[in-house]
Image (cartoon, rainbow, N blue to C red):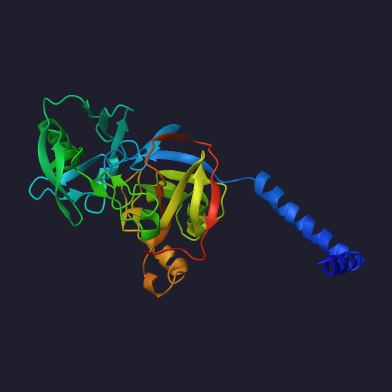
């Protein structure tokens, strides 16, 4: 052992080795200084979508738990005859219904064209009744029907026989998480398609605008957490992130339906945005993604404890992955 120590000392005394060690040390220090003090992505917008398919509500700060943002997709619109949910996929005019919700769950719907308002007190049970709803393959989900007054509002706004329903304690839908995520946490969700949270990136939307003939607003992708300060599509490679000491896992990149082709302000539709995504990004993630569109990442919170987030909060990338997850 003493002989080995003497040999190491002799090697370290050589000038070129000292320079190499100094260079390595400088590089290591520089890396950690950069990591600590370099600008980090931050939350640009927080958007709650109280009613699935309708316009969202931007907030400066909000509560977030394993189910996602408080009251997010807690209500949905269903067909009166089949109880199946509808969204902008079937009714583009849902973009003209603005929504507001209080922290206590009192809901307001506003018909942007006429100015008509519908207010529903969460604790007012004079009009509600039990019912069932359908979300994708999940049928006969227990829901609470919000009454005839809400149905009449939807009839005037959208011209169809529809019902407004909200989730209840018995709704109990479970998010479609990857096995490795389920080992850490299991989440129930409201009426989200499959996951409690969607993160989108302003820089990614700007990239699309540069490659389309029209300006693409990030609200087309209906993200709950919109970030700024990261490169375009940097989020694709995030495996886990931290916001205010809370950890979130990226389950997969988000496959997109036809909704991003709909202008959320006007309800007008243009397929160029989806065609552009397919042109430049299809095939990047392997043979399974041919002709599939991806934008944003589906997130789950590590625990179910409710915390607050706010605009301006920094995003710390805890872990990167080798390639985006598709499923």
User: Where 27 sits versus 74, above or below?
Assistant: below
Task: Please determine whether, in this image, residue 167 is positioned above or below residue 239.
Answer: above
The quadrant of the rendering that contains the C terminus is bottom left
The image quarter containing residue 225 is top left
- Residue 203 is situated, as x and y percent measured from the top left of the image, at 53, 52
- State whether residue 273 appears in this view: no
Q: Residue at x 31, y 31 (%)?
A: 100
Front residue of this view, candidates 138 and 73: 138
Asked whether residue 151 is in view, the answer is yes
Image coords of residue 70 (percent x, y): 34, 36
Location of residue 243 with respect to 100 vertically, above or below: below
Q: Residue visible at 83% across and 69% down?
A: 4
Give the left or right position of residue 292, taking residue 137 as reference: right
Q: Is residue 313 left or right of residue 288?
A: right
In the current view of this chain or complex, which residue is farthest to the front? 1
Residue at 78 percent across and 60 percent down: it is: 24
Q: How far from the left and from the top, in percent, is residue 132? A: 12, 44
Percent across and percent down for residue 286 are 43, 73
Which quadrant: the N terminus?
bottom right
Residue at 17% from the left image edge and 38% from the top image edge:
164
Which residue occupies the foreground of this view, 258 or 52?
52
Q: Given the current orientation, which residue lies at the most extreme bottom position? A: 287
């Amino acid at each position: 052992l003493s002989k080995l120590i003497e040999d190491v000392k002799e090697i370290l005394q050589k000038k070129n080795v000292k320079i190499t060690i100094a260079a390595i040390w400088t590089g290591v220090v520089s890396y950690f200084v950069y990591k600590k003090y370099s600008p980090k992505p931050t939350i640009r917008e927080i958007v709650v979508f109280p009613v699935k398919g309708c316009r969202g509500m931007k907030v400066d700060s909000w509560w977030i738990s394993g189910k996602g943002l408080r009251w997010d997709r807690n209500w949905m619109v269903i067909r009166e005859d089949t109880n199946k949910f509808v969204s902008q996929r079937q009714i583009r005019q849902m973009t003209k219904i603005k929504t507001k919700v209080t922290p206590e769950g009192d809901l307001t719907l506003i018909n942007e064209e006429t100015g008509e308002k519908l207010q529903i007190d969460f604790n007012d049970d004079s009009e509600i009744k039990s019912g069932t709803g359908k979300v994708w393959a999940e049928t006969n989900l227990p829901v609470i029907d919000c009454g005839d007054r809400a149905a009449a509002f939807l009839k005037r706004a959208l011209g169809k026989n529809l019902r407004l329903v909200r989730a209840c304690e018995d709704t109990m839908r479970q998010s479609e998480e990857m096995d490795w995520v389920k080992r850490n946490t299991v989440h129930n969700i409201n009426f989200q398609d499959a996951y409690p949270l969607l993160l989108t990136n302003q820089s990614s939307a700007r990239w699309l605008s540069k490659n389309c003939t029209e300006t693409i607003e990030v609200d087309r992708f209906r993200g709950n957490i919109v970030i700024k300060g990261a490169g375009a599509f940097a989020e694709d490679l995030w495996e886990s992130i931290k916001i205010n000491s809370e950890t979130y896992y990226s389950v997969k990149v988000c496959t997109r339906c036809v909704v991003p082709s709909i202008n959320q302000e006007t309800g007008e539709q243009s397929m160029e945005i989806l065609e552009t995504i397919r042109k430049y990004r299809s095939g990047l993630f392997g043979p399974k993604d041919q002709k599939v569109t991806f934008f944003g990442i589906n997130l789950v919170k590590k625990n179910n404890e409710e915390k607050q987030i706010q605009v301006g909060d920094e995003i710390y990338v805890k872990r990167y992955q080798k390639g985006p997850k598709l499923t």
